[in-house]
Every structure is written in structure tokens, then in C-alpha cells.
Amino acid sequence: MTHVDPMDPHEAFAELGRIRLADIDLDTLLDSIAQLAKRTIPGASEVSVTLLHGNKPQTAAFTGALALALAEKPYERGYGPCLQAAESTTSLMVPDTGSEQRWPGWTQTAAQAGAHSTLSVGLRNPVSTPHSAPDVTGRTAGRGVTAVRSWSDRRCRFG
């Protein structure tokens, strides 16, 4: 996991506000969000951003190889804090992956890889596209950010 200089949240929001959406593609925007989150969230060593295509999650941006590898594990298992945060549009913190019991297998993988804490922030999906697939409730889920997840190489409470 790589270290970056911290950034004041006000400065990060101002930087996001200066982005002209007409001049940037979605991948570049999500990469900017991941990089800003890494600099803004206290304790974050790596960050990933998940998009939902229909009901299928996909890691769309990440700040390092470990963030990508660990982001993909819950998709394979069908559970984990990021997926739960996305489904419930809440935030979930795991201050110590070595002792966490809610997601067996996933937490052990994270701890063994050196990610000792994680924070997952679920976001509402405001995007709907003509190619969106209906979810289990029959509603159409578009392509949108469903979660921003940060990892730390130390046990922490992100703040």
C-alpha cells in the first residue's frame, strides 16, 4: 500500500467541483474520486470504487493492486462489507479484519493480504440507462457508483 499526503476534505470537494463533466469520461472521473478519497479519508492506504451494471458489481477505479484484488473477492463470494453497504446505502466499518466475524472468509483474506481495516460507503444509484437490467424487485438499476471502499494497512477507525 502506498502513502500519499493528506488533503483537507474542503479542498477535495472544491477540486471535484472544478471538474467539467462535459470534458471528462466516467473512468477518469471515478479515478479522480478514488485518488481524492485516498488523500482525504484519514487512515486510507488504498481506495476502490464499485459500479453496478444491472445487479453485477464491477471495480471501476482503484488506487493500487491490493485495492483491486480485495475489491473483487466479495463479488466472487457474493458477500462482504462493500456489497452490504451498497445494498443498504449505508457505511460499514471494519476496524480489525483479523477479528471481524460478519463476513467469514473475506475478512481472513483481507487480513492475510495486509489490509487490517476497511471502510465501505454505499451510495444511491441515481443513474438509469436504456440498457439497464431490472433488479430482483423489478426496478431498473442503471450504471452508477454503488460504493467507495477504503483500505488501511493498520487497524484504525478512519478518522
Image (spheres, rainbow, N blue to C red):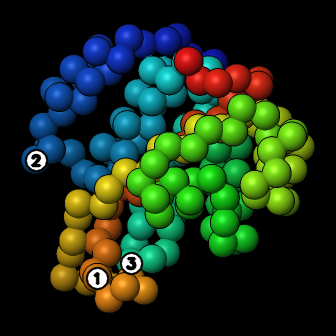
Task: State the SS at label 3.
Answer: loop
Residue 116 horizontal side relative to residue 136, left or right: right
Residue positioned 46% across, 59% down in the render: 88
Q: Mark 3: few, some, or many residues within 10 Å (few <14, many ≥20)?
A: some
Identify residue for label 3. Answer: 54
Closer to the N terminus: mark 1 or mark 3? 3
Q: Quadrant of the N terminus?
A: top right
Q: Quadrant of the C terminus?
A: top right
Q: Position of residue 146 (x, y in %)?
A: 41, 57
Alpha carbon distance from label 2 to label 3:
24 Å
The one nearer the camera, 4 or 43, is 43
Residue type highlighted by circle 3? Gly
Alpha carbon distance from label 2 to label 1:
28 Å
Name the mark on residue 139: 1
Question: Residue 111 sits in which quadrant?
Answer: top right
Residue type highlighted by circle 2? Ala
